[in-house]
Amino acid sequence: MAKTYAEINEKIRKGQAVVVTAEEMIDVVADAGIRKAAKQVDVVTTGTFAPMCSSGAFLNFGHTDPRMKVQHAWLNGVPAYGGLAAVDLYIGATVVAEDDPLNTEHPGEFRYGGGHVIQDLIAGNDVRLVAEGYGTDCYPRKRLDTWLNLKDLNQAFLCDPRNCYQNYNVAVNLHAERDIYTYLGVVKKDLGSANYCSAGQLSPLLNDPYYKTIGIGTRIFLGGAQGYVFWEGTQHDPTVARSENGVPKGGAGTLAVVGDMKAMEPKWIVGVSMLGYGASLAVGLGIPIPILNEEMARYTAVKDEDIVAAIVDYSRDYSHNEGRPLGHVSYKELKSGSITIKGKQVPTVSLSSYPRAREIAAILKEWIKAGDFELTEPVQLLPSADSGQTFKNLKERPASQEGR
Amino acid sequence: MVERRVVLHFPENLIDQPIVSRMVREFSLEFNILRANITPQQEGLMVLGLAGKRVDVDKALRWARQQGVSVQPLEKNVVRNESVCTHCGACVVVCPTAALWKDPETQDVIFDPDKCIACELCVPVCPPRAMEVAF
Protein backbone atom coordinates (compact mmCIF):
# COMPACT_ATOMS: atom_id res chain seq x y z
CA MET A 1 0.00 0.00 0.00
CA ALA A 2 2.59 2.54 1.06
CA LYS A 3 4.84 3.95 -1.69
CA THR A 4 8.55 4.67 -1.52
CA TYR A 5 10.51 7.60 -2.90
CA ALA A 6 12.22 5.19 -5.30
CA GLU A 7 8.91 3.94 -6.65
CA ILE A 8 7.62 7.47 -7.16
CA ASN A 9 10.85 8.50 -8.91
CA GLU A 10 10.64 5.45 -11.16
CA LYS A 11 7.17 6.60 -12.20
CA ILE A 12 8.47 10.14 -12.77
CA ARG A 13 11.22 8.79 -15.04
CA LYS A 14 8.68 6.81 -17.02
CA GLY A 15 6.39 9.82 -17.28
CA GLN A 16 3.70 7.93 -15.38
CA ALA A 17 3.61 9.83 -12.11
CA VAL A 18 0.30 11.35 -11.11
CA VAL A 19 1.03 14.86 -9.95
CA VAL A 20 -1.52 17.38 -8.70
CA THR A 21 -1.26 20.74 -6.99
CA ALA A 22 -2.30 21.17 -3.36
CA GLU A 23 -5.41 22.99 -4.60
CA GLU A 24 -6.32 20.11 -6.91
CA MET A 25 -5.65 17.56 -4.16
CA ILE A 26 -8.53 19.02 -2.14
CA ASP A 27 -10.94 18.03 -4.91
CA VAL A 28 -9.29 14.67 -5.53
CA VAL A 29 -9.77 13.70 -1.89
CA ALA A 30 -13.29 15.13 -1.79
CA ASP A 31 -14.24 13.02 -4.84
CA ALA A 32 -12.31 9.81 -4.28
CA GLY A 33 -11.73 9.73 -0.53
CA ILE A 34 -8.40 9.52 1.30
CA ARG A 35 -7.71 5.86 0.56
CA LYS A 36 -8.18 6.06 -3.21
CA ALA A 37 -6.46 9.44 -3.42
CA ALA A 38 -3.41 8.03 -1.63
CA LYS A 39 -3.25 5.23 -4.19
CA GLN A 40 -3.88 7.41 -7.25
CA VAL A 41 -1.75 10.44 -6.52
CA ASP A 42 2.03 10.24 -6.32
CA VAL A 43 3.04 13.84 -5.72
CA VAL A 44 1.30 17.00 -4.50
CA THR A 45 2.98 20.29 -5.38
CA THR A 46 2.84 23.38 -3.20
CA GLY A 47 3.93 26.99 -3.56
CA THR A 48 4.34 30.29 -1.79
CA PHE A 49 5.47 33.77 -2.82
CA ALA A 50 6.00 36.44 -0.19
CA PRO A 51 8.55 38.75 1.37
CA MET A 52 10.98 36.58 3.33
CA CYS A 53 13.31 38.91 5.18
CA SER A 54 15.83 36.34 6.33
CA SER A 55 17.30 35.82 2.87
CA GLY A 56 20.58 36.64 1.21
CA ALA A 57 23.24 35.51 -1.20
CA PHE A 58 26.85 34.36 -1.23
CA LEU A 59 28.91 35.69 -4.12
CA ASN A 60 32.45 34.90 -5.19
CA PHE A 61 33.78 37.33 -7.80
CA GLY A 62 37.28 35.90 -8.28
CA HIS A 63 40.71 37.30 -7.49
CA THR A 64 41.79 40.74 -8.53
CA ASP A 65 45.21 41.67 -9.89
CA PRO A 66 47.02 42.28 -7.63
CA ARG A 67 45.11 40.22 -5.14
CA MET A 68 42.94 41.81 -2.51
CA LYS A 69 41.43 40.68 0.78
CA VAL A 70 38.13 42.50 0.89
CA GLN A 71 37.28 43.94 4.28
CA HIS A 72 34.39 46.26 3.41
CA ALA A 73 32.28 46.07 0.30
CA TRP A 74 29.27 47.79 -1.26
CA LEU A 75 27.09 46.52 -4.10
CA ASN A 76 25.26 49.41 -5.79
CA GLY A 77 25.93 51.33 -2.60
CA VAL A 78 24.45 48.63 -0.37
CA PRO A 79 26.87 47.19 2.21
CA ALA A 80 27.79 43.54 1.75
CA TYR A 81 29.53 41.43 4.36
CA GLY A 82 33.19 40.82 3.54
CA GLY A 83 34.30 39.00 6.66
CA LEU A 84 34.97 35.83 4.70
CA ALA A 85 38.33 34.97 3.12
CA ALA A 86 39.34 37.30 0.27
CA VAL A 87 36.70 37.64 -2.46
CA ASP A 88 33.60 36.04 -0.95
CA LEU A 89 30.69 38.31 -0.03
CA TYR A 90 27.34 37.82 1.64
CA ILE A 91 24.61 40.28 0.81
CA GLY A 92 21.57 40.24 3.09
CA ALA A 93 18.07 41.04 1.83
CA THR A 94 17.24 43.75 4.34
CA VAL A 95 20.40 45.86 4.32
CA VAL A 96 19.89 49.29 2.74
CA ALA A 97 22.24 51.77 1.08
CA GLU A 98 24.39 53.70 3.54
CA ASP A 99 22.89 57.00 2.41
CA ASP A 100 19.30 55.76 2.77
CA PRO A 101 17.29 58.28 4.81
CA LEU A 102 15.74 55.35 6.71
CA ASN A 103 12.86 56.56 8.85
CA THR A 104 14.17 60.11 9.37
CA GLU A 105 11.14 61.24 7.43
CA HIS A 106 8.61 58.71 8.60
CA PRO A 107 7.48 56.56 6.90
CA GLY A 108 10.72 55.95 5.02
CA GLU A 109 10.53 54.45 1.55
CA PHE A 110 13.57 52.13 1.66
CA ARG A 111 13.73 52.14 -2.11
CA TYR A 112 16.85 50.06 -2.64
CA GLY A 113 18.39 47.36 -0.49
CA GLY A 114 20.04 43.96 -0.55
CA GLY A 115 16.95 42.30 -1.99
CA HIS A 116 17.07 44.68 -4.95
CA VAL A 117 20.77 43.95 -5.49
CA ILE A 118 19.97 40.22 -5.58
CA GLN A 119 17.14 40.75 -8.05
CA ASP A 120 19.33 42.98 -10.21
CA LEU A 121 22.01 40.29 -10.34
CA ILE A 122 19.48 37.60 -11.26
CA ALA A 123 18.02 39.90 -13.93
CA GLY A 124 21.49 40.04 -15.51
CA ASN A 125 22.01 43.71 -14.70
CA ASP A 126 25.51 44.99 -14.01
CA VAL A 127 26.05 45.76 -10.33
CA ARG A 128 28.79 48.11 -9.13
CA LEU A 129 31.17 46.68 -6.55
CA VAL A 130 33.22 49.05 -4.42
CA ALA A 131 35.56 47.35 -1.98
CA GLU A 132 38.25 48.26 0.51
CA GLY A 133 40.97 46.18 2.08
CA TYR A 134 43.79 46.94 4.48
CA GLY A 135 46.50 45.23 2.46
CA THR A 136 48.62 42.26 3.45
CA ASP A 137 51.83 40.75 2.09
CA CYS A 138 49.85 38.25 0.03
CA TYR A 139 46.84 40.51 -0.65
CA PRO A 140 48.33 43.97 -1.21
CA ARG A 141 45.48 45.72 -3.04
CA LYS A 142 43.42 48.17 -1.00
CA ARG A 143 40.75 49.55 -3.29
CA LEU A 144 38.45 48.19 -5.99
CA ASP A 145 35.67 49.80 -8.04
CA THR A 146 34.27 47.60 -10.79
CA TRP A 147 31.14 46.38 -12.50
CA LEU A 148 30.02 42.83 -11.77
CA ASN A 149 27.65 40.62 -13.70
CA LEU A 150 26.14 37.39 -12.44
CA LYS A 151 27.41 35.43 -15.42
CA ASP A 152 31.01 36.29 -14.54
CA LEU A 153 30.80 35.29 -10.88
CA ASN A 154 32.34 31.96 -9.89
CA GLN A 155 29.54 31.13 -7.52
CA ALA A 156 26.38 32.99 -6.66
CA PHE A 157 23.92 31.15 -4.50
CA LEU A 158 20.90 32.33 -2.67
CA CYS A 159 21.28 31.14 0.90
CA ASP A 160 18.29 32.00 3.05
CA PRO A 161 18.45 31.18 6.76
CA ARG A 162 14.69 31.43 7.25
CA ASN A 163 12.10 31.05 4.51
CA CYS A 164 8.74 29.45 4.06
CA TYR A 165 7.22 30.18 7.47
CA GLN A 166 4.64 27.61 8.38
CA ASN A 167 1.74 29.96 9.09
CA TYR A 168 1.99 33.51 10.40
CA ASN A 169 0.28 36.19 12.48
CA VAL A 170 -2.57 38.36 11.28
CA ALA A 171 -1.60 41.92 12.25
CA VAL A 172 -4.09 44.50 13.49
CA ASN A 173 -3.74 47.98 14.97
CA LEU A 174 -5.74 48.42 18.17
CA HIS A 175 -3.99 51.19 20.05
CA ALA A 176 -2.06 53.54 17.77
CA GLU A 177 -3.71 56.82 16.84
CA ARG A 178 -2.29 56.52 13.35
CA ASP A 179 -1.64 53.84 10.76
CA ILE A 180 1.42 51.78 11.58
CA TYR A 181 4.07 50.64 9.10
CA THR A 182 5.19 47.06 9.54
CA TYR A 183 6.74 44.17 7.66
CA LEU A 184 3.13 43.13 7.09
CA GLY A 185 2.41 46.39 5.30
CA VAL A 186 0.38 49.39 6.42
CA VAL A 187 -1.86 48.34 9.30
CA LYS A 188 -4.68 50.88 9.51
CA LYS A 189 -5.66 52.49 12.78
CA ASP A 190 -8.90 51.71 14.65
CA LEU A 191 -8.91 48.09 13.51
CA GLY A 192 -8.89 49.40 9.95
CA SER A 193 -7.17 46.39 8.43
CA ALA A 194 -6.08 42.83 9.16
CA ASN A 195 -2.81 42.04 7.38
CA TYR A 196 -1.80 38.46 6.75
CA CYS A 197 0.94 36.62 4.89
CA SER A 198 0.55 32.99 3.93
CA ALA A 199 -0.56 31.02 0.90
CA GLY A 200 -2.73 28.93 3.25
CA GLN A 201 -3.80 25.71 1.58
CA LEU A 202 -1.02 25.99 -1.04
CA SER A 203 1.77 26.73 1.44
CA PRO A 204 4.44 24.00 1.63
CA LEU A 205 4.72 23.41 5.36
CA LEU A 206 0.97 23.63 5.90
CA ASN A 207 0.69 20.57 3.64
CA ASP A 208 3.26 18.62 5.63
CA PRO A 209 2.54 19.92 9.11
CA TYR A 210 4.84 17.53 10.99
CA TYR A 211 7.71 17.71 8.42
CA LYS A 212 7.36 14.01 7.58
CA THR A 213 8.72 14.44 4.04
CA ILE A 214 10.34 17.90 4.02
CA GLY A 215 13.78 17.84 5.60
CA ILE A 216 17.48 18.32 4.99
CA GLY A 217 18.23 17.58 1.35
CA THR A 218 14.71 18.06 0.02
CA ARG A 219 14.84 19.36 -3.54
CA ILE A 220 12.56 22.36 -4.06
CA PHE A 221 11.51 25.10 -6.46
CA LEU A 222 13.47 28.17 -5.41
CA GLY A 223 13.31 31.39 -7.38
CA GLY A 224 12.48 29.62 -10.62
CA ALA A 225 15.29 27.08 -10.28
CA GLN A 226 15.87 23.84 -8.42
CA GLY A 227 17.18 24.43 -4.91
CA TYR A 228 17.45 22.53 -1.66
CA VAL A 229 16.49 22.64 1.99
CA PHE A 230 19.77 22.57 3.88
CA TRP A 231 18.72 22.95 7.51
CA GLU A 232 15.83 23.85 9.75
CA GLY A 233 15.27 27.57 9.38
CA THR A 234 16.19 29.98 12.15
CA GLN A 235 13.38 30.39 14.70
CA HIS A 236 12.05 26.94 13.72
CA ASP A 237 9.43 26.39 16.40
CA PRO A 238 7.72 23.03 15.93
CA THR A 239 6.02 22.76 19.33
CA VAL A 240 3.49 25.59 18.99
CA ALA A 241 -0.23 24.92 19.51
CA ARG A 242 -1.81 22.96 16.68
CA SER A 243 -5.34 22.36 15.48
CA GLU A 244 -6.77 18.83 15.53
CA ASN A 245 -5.58 18.30 11.96
CA GLY A 246 -2.01 18.92 13.11
CA VAL A 247 -1.70 22.34 11.47
CA PRO A 248 0.02 24.95 13.66
CA LYS A 249 -2.19 27.85 14.71
CA GLY A 250 0.63 30.36 14.32
CA GLY A 251 4.20 30.76 13.11
CA ALA A 252 5.95 27.40 13.57
CA GLY A 253 8.33 25.55 11.27
CA THR A 254 10.76 27.35 8.97
CA LEU A 255 13.29 26.25 6.35
CA ALA A 256 16.84 27.24 5.48
CA VAL A 257 17.18 26.97 1.70
CA VAL A 258 19.87 27.30 -0.93
CA GLY A 259 19.94 27.51 -4.71
CA ASP A 260 21.98 28.63 -7.72
CA MET A 261 21.16 32.22 -8.63
CA LYS A 262 22.44 31.70 -12.17
CA ALA A 263 19.45 29.45 -12.84
CA MET A 264 16.90 31.74 -11.17
CA GLU A 265 14.52 34.24 -12.74
CA PRO A 266 13.82 37.80 -11.56
CA LYS A 267 10.09 37.09 -11.60
CA TRP A 268 10.49 34.79 -8.61
CA ILE A 269 13.11 36.71 -6.61
CA VAL A 270 11.85 40.25 -6.20
CA GLY A 271 13.42 43.08 -4.20
CA VAL A 272 10.71 44.82 -2.19
CA SER A 273 10.38 48.03 -0.17
CA MET A 274 8.13 47.96 2.87
CA LEU A 275 7.04 51.53 3.58
CA GLY A 276 8.26 52.67 7.00
CA TYR A 277 9.84 49.30 7.65
CA GLY A 278 12.70 48.46 5.33
CA ALA A 279 13.89 46.60 2.29
CA SER A 280 13.37 42.88 1.81
CA LEU A 281 13.14 40.12 -0.75
CA ALA A 282 10.04 38.36 -2.00
CA VAL A 283 10.90 34.72 -2.62
CA GLY A 284 9.04 32.19 -4.73
CA LEU A 285 9.33 28.73 -3.25
CA GLY A 286 7.57 25.45 -3.91
CA ILE A 287 7.96 21.96 -2.49
CA PRO A 288 6.74 18.63 -3.86
CA ILE A 289 5.22 16.32 -1.29
CA PRO A 290 5.34 12.59 -2.01
CA ILE A 291 2.10 10.82 -1.22
CA LEU A 292 3.78 7.91 0.52
CA ASN A 293 0.67 6.85 2.39
CA GLU A 294 -2.83 7.85 3.45
CA GLU A 295 -1.48 10.13 6.14
CA MET A 296 0.27 12.33 3.55
CA ALA A 297 -2.86 12.30 1.39
CA ARG A 298 -4.83 13.60 4.34
CA TYR A 299 -2.31 16.33 5.14
CA THR A 300 -2.09 17.55 1.56
CA ALA A 301 -5.88 17.81 1.26
CA VAL A 302 -5.93 20.55 3.90
CA LYS A 303 -8.25 23.44 3.01
CA ASP A 304 -8.15 27.15 3.79
CA GLU A 305 -11.09 26.75 6.18
CA ASP A 306 -9.11 24.22 8.22
CA ILE A 307 -6.07 26.47 8.67
CA VAL A 308 -6.28 29.21 11.27
CA ALA A 309 -3.95 32.07 12.12
CA ALA A 310 -3.67 34.15 15.28
CA ILE A 311 -4.84 37.78 15.22
CA VAL A 312 -2.17 39.84 16.98
CA ASP A 313 -2.09 43.53 17.85
CA TYR A 314 1.01 45.10 16.26
CA SER A 315 0.54 48.55 17.79
CA ARG A 316 1.58 47.35 21.26
CA ASP A 317 1.29 43.63 22.05
CA TYR A 318 3.66 42.37 19.36
CA SER A 319 6.35 44.99 19.92
CA HIS A 320 6.35 44.55 23.68
CA ASN A 321 5.77 40.81 23.83
CA GLU A 322 2.53 41.46 25.68
CA GLY A 323 -1.03 40.29 25.55
CA ARG A 324 -2.60 37.34 23.86
CA PRO A 325 -3.94 36.83 20.37
CA LEU A 326 -7.31 38.49 19.89
CA GLY A 327 -8.54 35.25 18.43
CA HIS A 328 -8.01 32.98 15.46
CA VAL A 329 -9.33 33.26 11.94
CA SER A 330 -9.23 30.88 8.99
CA TYR A 331 -7.56 31.58 5.65
CA LYS A 332 -10.91 31.10 3.98
CA GLU A 333 -12.23 34.05 5.97
CA LEU A 334 -9.05 36.07 5.36
CA LYS A 335 -9.25 35.49 1.61
CA SER A 336 -12.92 36.54 1.52
CA GLY A 337 -11.79 40.18 1.85
CA SER A 338 -12.93 40.97 5.39
CA ILE A 339 -13.14 39.41 8.82
CA THR A 340 -15.02 40.35 11.98
CA ILE A 341 -13.04 41.39 15.04
CA LYS A 342 -14.73 42.71 18.18
CA GLY A 343 -17.95 43.06 16.21
CA LYS A 344 -16.30 45.21 13.54
CA GLN A 345 -15.94 44.27 9.90
CA VAL A 346 -12.25 44.62 9.11
CA PRO A 347 -10.84 44.54 5.54
CA THR A 348 -8.06 42.01 5.03
CA VAL A 349 -4.74 42.70 3.32
CA SER A 350 -2.44 40.02 1.98
CA LEU A 351 1.30 40.40 1.66
CA SER A 352 1.64 36.93 0.17
CA SER A 353 0.67 36.50 -3.48
CA TYR A 354 -1.73 33.62 -3.85
CA PRO A 355 -1.79 33.91 -7.67
CA ARG A 356 2.00 33.52 -7.73
CA ALA A 357 1.84 30.61 -5.26
CA ARG A 358 -0.61 28.90 -7.58
CA GLU A 359 1.71 29.51 -10.55
CA ILE A 360 4.66 27.99 -8.67
CA ALA A 361 2.71 24.85 -7.74
CA ALA A 362 1.68 24.51 -11.39
CA ILE A 363 5.26 24.94 -12.68
CA LEU A 364 6.59 22.38 -10.23
CA LYS A 365 3.87 19.98 -11.32
CA GLU A 366 4.92 20.40 -14.95
CA TRP A 367 8.60 19.89 -14.12
CA ILE A 368 7.82 16.62 -12.35
CA LYS A 369 5.44 15.41 -15.05
CA ALA A 370 8.07 16.15 -17.68
CA GLY A 371 10.63 14.11 -15.75
CA ASP A 372 12.83 17.15 -15.10
CA PHE A 373 12.49 17.07 -11.34
CA GLU A 374 12.81 13.98 -9.15
CA LEU A 375 11.98 13.82 -5.48
CA THR A 376 14.62 13.45 -2.80
CA GLU A 377 14.27 11.62 0.48
CA PRO A 378 15.55 13.85 3.28
CA VAL A 379 18.91 12.76 4.68
CA GLN A 380 17.60 13.95 8.02
CA LEU A 381 14.16 15.10 9.14
CA LEU A 382 13.60 18.40 10.91
CA PRO A 383 12.73 18.63 14.62
CA SER A 384 8.97 18.14 14.86
CA ALA A 385 6.19 18.53 17.42
CA ASP A 386 7.64 15.77 19.61
CA SER A 387 11.13 17.32 19.75
CA GLY A 388 10.52 19.59 22.70
CA GLN A 389 12.30 22.34 20.74
CA THR A 390 10.90 25.83 21.24
CA PHE A 391 11.78 29.29 20.03
CA LYS A 392 12.92 31.42 22.95
CA ASN A 393 13.14 35.16 23.28
CA LEU A 394 16.37 36.66 24.56
CA LYS A 395 16.88 36.55 28.28
CA GLU A 396 18.95 39.68 28.72
CA ARG A 397 21.92 39.82 31.02
CA PRO A 398 22.72 43.53 30.67
CA ALA A 399 26.43 44.08 30.17
CA SER A 400 26.18 47.85 30.60
CA GLN A 401 23.64 50.58 31.23
CA GLU A 402 23.86 51.76 27.61
CA GLY A 403 22.06 48.70 26.30
CA ARG A 404 18.90 49.48 28.25
CA MET B 1 -21.35 62.42 -24.66
CA VAL B 2 -17.96 63.05 -23.13
CA GLU B 3 -16.50 62.13 -19.77
CA ARG B 4 -13.96 64.34 -18.14
CA ARG B 5 -12.17 64.28 -14.81
CA VAL B 6 -11.29 67.63 -13.28
CA VAL B 7 -9.78 68.98 -10.10
CA LEU B 8 -11.73 71.92 -8.64
CA HIS B 9 -10.22 74.29 -6.10
CA PHE B 10 -12.77 76.37 -4.17
CA PRO B 11 -11.50 79.49 -2.42
CA GLU B 12 -12.72 79.97 1.14
CA ASN B 13 -15.53 82.37 0.16
CA LEU B 14 -17.10 79.77 -2.16
CA ILE B 15 -17.08 76.80 0.17
CA ASP B 16 -20.67 77.30 1.26
CA GLN B 17 -21.97 77.88 -2.29
CA PRO B 18 -23.85 75.10 -4.15
CA ILE B 19 -21.53 75.41 -7.17
CA VAL B 20 -21.43 71.78 -8.20
CA SER B 21 -25.13 71.40 -7.74
CA ARG B 22 -25.81 74.35 -10.07
CA MET B 23 -23.23 73.14 -12.59
CA VAL B 24 -24.84 69.77 -13.03
CA ARG B 25 -28.42 71.06 -12.97
CA GLU B 26 -28.07 74.01 -15.31
CA PHE B 27 -25.90 72.19 -17.82
CA SER B 28 -27.60 68.77 -17.60
CA LEU B 29 -24.47 66.91 -16.54
CA GLU B 30 -23.93 63.71 -14.66
CA PHE B 31 -21.34 63.89 -11.95
CA ASN B 32 -19.34 61.57 -9.78
CA ILE B 33 -17.42 62.92 -6.79
CA LEU B 34 -14.12 61.04 -6.75
CA ARG B 35 -12.58 62.93 -3.87
CA ALA B 36 -13.54 65.93 -1.77
CA ASN B 37 -12.00 67.62 1.19
CA ILE B 38 -11.45 70.96 2.84
CA THR B 39 -7.85 71.83 3.55
CA PRO B 40 -6.70 73.36 6.86
CA GLN B 41 -6.49 76.68 5.00
CA GLN B 42 -10.26 76.38 4.45
CA GLU B 43 -9.96 75.79 0.74
CA GLY B 44 -12.11 73.17 -0.87
CA LEU B 45 -10.69 70.55 -3.20
CA MET B 46 -12.82 68.26 -5.27
CA VAL B 47 -11.95 65.69 -7.88
CA LEU B 48 -15.00 65.39 -10.08
CA GLY B 49 -15.97 63.16 -12.94
CA LEU B 50 -18.35 64.94 -15.33
CA ALA B 51 -20.34 63.40 -18.15
CA GLY B 52 -22.61 65.11 -20.64
CA LYS B 53 -22.60 66.75 -24.05
CA ARG B 54 -19.19 68.17 -24.87
CA VAL B 55 -20.59 71.66 -25.32
CA ASP B 56 -22.38 71.47 -21.95
CA VAL B 57 -19.30 70.23 -20.09
CA ASP B 58 -17.28 73.09 -21.57
CA LYS B 59 -19.95 75.63 -20.68
CA ALA B 60 -20.26 74.31 -17.13
CA LEU B 61 -16.52 74.52 -16.52
CA ARG B 62 -16.40 78.02 -17.99
CA TRP B 63 -19.23 79.05 -15.68
CA ALA B 64 -17.44 77.55 -12.66
CA ARG B 65 -14.32 79.51 -13.51
CA GLN B 66 -16.40 82.69 -13.70
CA GLN B 67 -17.59 82.00 -10.15
CA GLY B 68 -13.98 81.94 -8.97
CA VAL B 69 -13.36 78.20 -8.93
CA SER B 70 -10.02 77.08 -10.29
CA VAL B 71 -10.49 74.21 -12.73
CA GLN B 72 -7.69 71.89 -13.76
CA PRO B 73 -7.93 68.73 -15.77
CA LEU B 74 -6.79 65.62 -13.90
CA GLU B 75 -3.58 65.18 -15.80
CA LYS B 76 -1.67 62.78 -13.67
CA ASN B 77 -2.42 59.14 -14.02
CA VAL B 78 -1.35 56.28 -11.86
CA VAL B 79 -0.57 53.26 -13.98
CA ARG B 80 0.30 49.74 -12.99
CA ASN B 81 3.39 48.14 -14.41
CA GLU B 82 1.89 44.73 -15.03
CA SER B 83 5.21 42.94 -15.27
CA VAL B 84 6.20 44.18 -11.82
CA CYS B 85 2.94 43.64 -9.89
CA THR B 86 3.02 40.37 -7.96
CA HIS B 87 -0.68 40.48 -6.97
CA CYS B 88 0.04 40.44 -3.26
CA GLY B 89 -2.56 42.97 -2.16
CA ALA B 90 -0.59 45.40 0.02
CA CYS B 91 -2.05 48.33 -1.96
CA VAL B 92 -5.70 47.47 -1.50
CA VAL B 93 -5.92 48.84 2.02
CA VAL B 94 -4.69 52.35 1.22
CA CYS B 95 -6.74 52.96 -1.94
CA PRO B 96 -9.48 55.45 -0.97
CA THR B 97 -11.72 54.75 -3.97
CA ALA B 98 -11.44 50.96 -4.23
CA ALA B 99 -9.78 51.37 -7.62
CA LEU B 100 -7.48 48.62 -6.36
CA TRP B 101 -9.27 45.58 -5.04
CA LYS B 102 -8.78 41.87 -4.66
CA ASP B 103 -10.95 39.42 -6.54
CA PRO B 104 -12.02 36.98 -3.81
CA GLU B 105 -12.27 34.15 -6.33
CA THR B 106 -8.87 34.35 -8.02
CA GLN B 107 -7.10 36.48 -5.38
CA ASP B 108 -5.82 38.65 -8.25
CA VAL B 109 -5.43 42.35 -7.49
CA ILE B 110 -7.61 44.27 -9.93
CA PHE B 111 -6.75 47.85 -10.90
CA ASP B 112 -9.64 49.91 -12.20
CA PRO B 113 -8.12 53.11 -13.70
CA ASP B 114 -11.57 54.70 -14.10
CA LYS B 115 -11.96 54.82 -10.35
CA CYS B 116 -8.40 56.04 -9.71
CA ILE B 117 -8.09 59.63 -8.54
CA ALA B 118 -4.29 59.66 -8.77
CA CYS B 119 -3.85 60.29 -5.06
CA GLU B 120 -0.63 58.23 -5.33
CA LEU B 121 -1.03 56.59 -1.90
CA CYS B 122 -0.44 53.19 -3.47
CA VAL B 123 2.87 54.21 -5.04
CA PRO B 124 5.17 53.90 -1.99
CA VAL B 125 3.02 51.19 -0.38
CA CYS B 126 3.51 48.72 -3.24
CA PRO B 127 6.39 46.45 -2.14
CA PRO B 128 7.83 45.86 -5.65
CA ARG B 129 6.90 49.41 -6.75
CA ALA B 130 4.57 48.44 -9.55
CA MET B 131 2.40 51.58 -9.31
CA GLU B 132 3.85 54.47 -11.30
CA VAL B 133 2.84 58.07 -11.83
CA ALA B 134 2.48 59.06 -15.46
CA PHE B 135 2.03 62.63 -16.67
Image (cartoon, coloured by chain):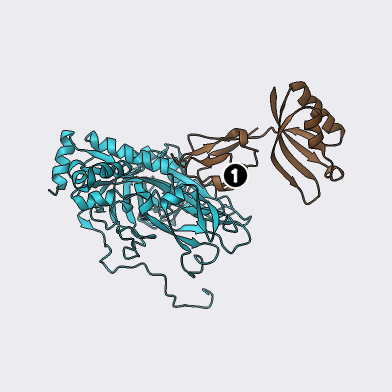
**Relative image position of residue A195 (x, y in whole percent):** 50, 53
Dot 1 crowding, Cα within 10 Å, few <14, some 14–19, many 20+: some
Q: Amino acid at mark 1?
A: Cys
The residue pinned by badge 1 equals: B95
Give A224 or A251, whichever is nearer the viewer. A251
Task: Give me the residue at 75% from left, 28% from top.
Answer: B29
From where the camera sits, is residue A352 visible?
A: yes
Chain under label 1? B
Give A318 or A21, whichever is nearer the viewer. A21
State left or right for residue A251 relative to residue B37: left
**Relative image position of residue B20 (x, y in whole percent):** 79, 36
With respect to residue A213, does B17 lie above or below? Answer: above
**Relative image position of residue A263 (x, y in whole percent):** 33, 39
Colour in which the image shows chain A:
cyan
Task: Give me the residue at 47% from left, 47% from top.
Answer: A336
**Relative image position of residue A244 (x, y in whole percent):** 31, 60
Chain in brown?
A: B
State left or right for residue A141 relative to residue A110: left
Q: Element at badge 1?
A: loop
Give A89 or B33, whichever is nearer the viewer. B33
With respect to residue A266, does A249 lie above or below? Answer: below
With respect to residue A100, does A16 lie above or below? Answer: above
Task: Give me the residue at 49% from left, 70% from top.
Answer: A323
